[in-house]
Amino acid sequence: MANPHPVLQDFVARGPITKSKIPFLPRPMNFLTQHAAVMEMLKSSDKFVVDGRNAGKRSQLPMCFMPKTFKLLMANMLSLDDPDHRRLRKVADKTFRTANIEALRPAIAEMADGVLDKMEGQAEPNLLDGYFDRLPLLVICELLGLDAIDRDRLTAEIKAFSDITSIMGIFKISPAIKRMSDYLRAEFEVVRKTPKPGLITQFVKLADTEEDRLSEDELLAMVFVLFIAGHETVKNLLSCAVPCLLDHPEQLQNLKEDSSLWPVAVEELIRFTSPVQMTKPRYAAHDMEFHEQALKKGQMFMALLSAANIDPAYFDDPLTFNIHREKVRHVGFGNGVHLCLGIQLARVEAQVALERLFARYPDLALAVPIERLVWAKRLGSRGLKHLPVQFSAHE
């Protein structure tokens, strides 16, 4: 598996700021492509804002035609600047502690084994649907405290978000958003009357206090984003990871022999495959000079994380996959005030899921040539549509 994004080399060379056309938007987008520029943008919330209104725009959204259901979810911390962002992040951080996530490791391993048990004996196993889609949903449902009876019901709704490949796709999933929103609002009322284990109860408890009060829409948006991000991002990471590892058998063998290598390996997988390709749009908060270029207030930018992750000015031999790399300071989780809230959850899930998979099936192989794998067409993310495998090399 060579460089997964050969076109990105050109973006890095043309950087630190270059233009490119992307779907949904009528004009070319300004992309930051080099590691230094991307890191500075991510850390400079005083220079770059996510809410267009803080940069002189009339709307918070880059696309004013978004459906009402989508606009409702814009009350989440990913789409807001301080002080609103800080207020919402404070509530999330109080419940999303690294120690709490690390304590879930045995439970995640048990869930992983259970999902693999159900795949045992399948004639044509597809890891994407059978394992990588199912496991993150089980984990996020467990973390949020959702009843087992509701998990299958929500699974179909969540899968709809994987199909957004055009403007029409945004409108098509509006009913799914409405159904999930109604379900979550009802769940908030349930836990207010009868608290139960899980983050939803903790969020509701904090949101209803005077110190950390959240509106019902803010609470809904927070849980909704955790649900979506906690599923889709990990699924894409895992689907990128397996073919990459199988294409580097010597390093995979190192991992099979020494499970302590998995944490660094997962970081290198994130850097090399970049399942999250780019950030949400940001706006120049004011006129400024940035990396020797004059920026105007209100100009829109996106950080091309996948390009920054192969920048030769920062990484030694960046197009080589190396689980023994000493410096893996990738930008796959973002940085700054909008650093991914679920960073530790994603790491632990990926480490456990991959370790359990290859421990159980050390002879795992692709069922098709690697060049015939089909990648999903999604804006901003990278992942497979299907991952057919053979659990034994002798199948």
Image: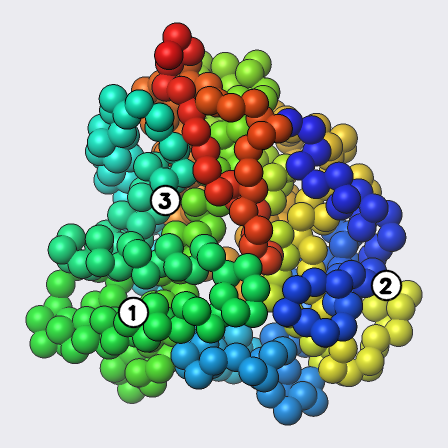
For the residues labelled 1 and 3, say whether their Cβ atoms are less than 8 Å apart.
Answer: no
For the point 47% across and 80% down, the residue is 67
Q: Which residue is mark 2?
A: 291
- Nearer the observer, 144 or 368: 368
For the residues labelled 2 and 1, say whether their Cβ atoms are less than 8 Å apart.
Answer: no
Earlier along the polypeptide chain: callout 2 or callout 1?
1
Residue 94 x %, y %: 35, 65
Q: Which residue is mark 3?
A: 133
Query: What's the image's color scheme?
Result: rainbow
Q: Which residue is mark 1?
A: 180
Q: In the drawing, does residue 32 fall left or right of residue 183?
A: right
Q: Residues within 10 Å of mark 1 (few under 14, many from 20)?
A: some
Residue 212 is at least partly visible in this image: no
Residue 73 x %, y %: 42, 76
Q: In the drawing, does residue 331 fall left or right of residue 141?
A: right
For the point 35% across and 28% down, the residue is 125
Residue 267 x %, y %: 55, 38
Measured in 3D between alpha carbons, the distance from the residue under mark 2 to the one under mark 1, in whole angstroms, is 43 Å
Which quadrant would the C terminus be assigned to in this image?
top left
Q: Is residue 66 above or below residue 361?
A: below
Q: Is residue 101 above or below residue 388?
A: below
Question: Which three-letter amino acid code belongs to the residue tagged 2?
Answer: His
For the point 35% across and 82% down, the residue is 217
Q: In the drawing, does residue 201 fall left or right of residue 341?
A: left
